[in-house]
Amino acid sequence: MAVSSNVVKGDNVAKPLAQAMEAGDGLLRLTPTWVPRSFLHPGKRIKLAPTDWYAYGAHRGGIDERWFASTTEAANEGRVWHEGLSFVTFGGQQFTLKDAVAEDGVKLIGDDLFDRFQKWPVYSKFFDNMGPIPHHMHQGFEHAALTGQEGKPESYYFPPQYNNVDNNFAYTFMGLEPGTTKAQLRKCLENWAQGDNGILDLSRAYRLKRGTGWLIPPGVLHAPGSLCTYEPQWGSDVFGMFQSLVEGREVPWSLLVKDVPKDKHQDLDFIIEQLDWDKNVDTHFKDHNYLEPIVDETASGKGYTDKWIVYGTVDGEQLFSAKELTIEPGVKCTLKDPGASGWITVQGRGRMGKLALQTPAMIHFGQETEDEVFITHTAAKRGVEIENTGSEPLVGLRYFGPDVHAKLPGVGDYRKR
């Protein structure tokens, strides 16, 4: 296990949570949450010690993801009980952020979010692979509900600090070539057992650029490339793999129908109908999904810059967003946000309120770090002082839940600069 033996569960979290909230003035220290994927190869850039890439056992696959401020369980076969869940650590004890939100959700995420969802409905991760992953999609809310789950829109940002190398294929196939027919895609599914089913012949790849990102609605096919990716997304782990062979590795049919009703596992037409066809064959796909950072002048000042890195809406809804804060050496600023956020430090050292911030060079499995914080709704609204005490820029990424911001840039607004 990657958690302390002194884990507090359920209703027993009230006392340590109250103590942690008081000691941190509403800031909660989180421990690293590592997630393996049996069908992928680790990209080896997320600071996990080389001895620990297969800490869950080789049969579980390598660890290629680190999840942030997560109350979402990873949908992995053979998972340990806490897989995907973030832990708060305080006074030698640990408890899940999920239990903390259930205990005092109004203070942690605000009354609006807690009333609507009764949980923190989003999460983010570092997604780090040596090569590309299969062309796949995440079900929308309507189709995910058929298996008792939620849909999964997501977004990408490629942090320069975690991308010193490209790895094997720094391009991502997204959507389908305009003019592609459902009959052509159906033929790919019919050819599943023949090796490469040829689905990438129906798509186009986009070169990935550090410091930029993408917004990916549910039902849109994508085959993420090999840049380490920061991914704010909805709190779900549903997916369906549409590509049968990747870099010579077989993708089992079970990963295509993992989140499909059992009576539809061989229904090719139903499987295809899960896709948002219009968005997949969009003739202006990049215009409608590509993101570049936008400086938030209202939250920036002398020696510090706050940028929008994930913004825009999915089908008209503000589901999640993210910002990147950069503070120069010796500078301090007060961060004041309209809602809670999950913070990860990606460069430098300093402090956030009473909590130290330090970007680790190497992390052993199960080791606690000083790079991750949950900024509760209470602290965010009051304001949090952050100071760079190091000799290089202090950089942190933070992501927000739905409908937090009264004003949010739209996709394409970066062109107005």
Image (spheres, rainbow, N blue to C red):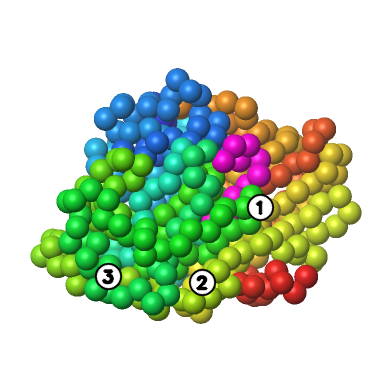
Q: Residue under label 1, please give it.
A: 211
Distance Cα–Cα, label 3 vs label 1: 35 Å
Q: Secondary structure at mark 3?
A: helix
Q: Residue under label 2, please give it.
A: 285
Give the foreground label among 3 and 1.
3
In the figure, residue 188 lies in which quadrant? bottom left
Q: Secondary structure at mark 2?
A: helix
CB contact under 8 Å: marks 3 and 2: no
| Vertical comparison of 380 with 287: above or below | above
**Image side of residue 369 versus residue 282, left or right:** right
Magenta stretch, residue numbers: 156-166
Residue at image point 62% right, 27% down: 361
Residue 338 spot, x, y in % from top left: 65, 65
User: In the rendering, which numbered label is found on residue 184?
Assistant: 3
First in sequence: mark 3 vs mark 2: 3
Distance Cα–Cα, label 3 vs label 2: 20 Å
Instruction: Tell how many labels.
Output: 3
CB contact under 8 Å: marks 2 and 1: no
Residue type, numbered disc 2: Phe
| Vertical comparison of 114 with 56: above or below | below
User: Is 159 within the magenta?
Assistant: yes
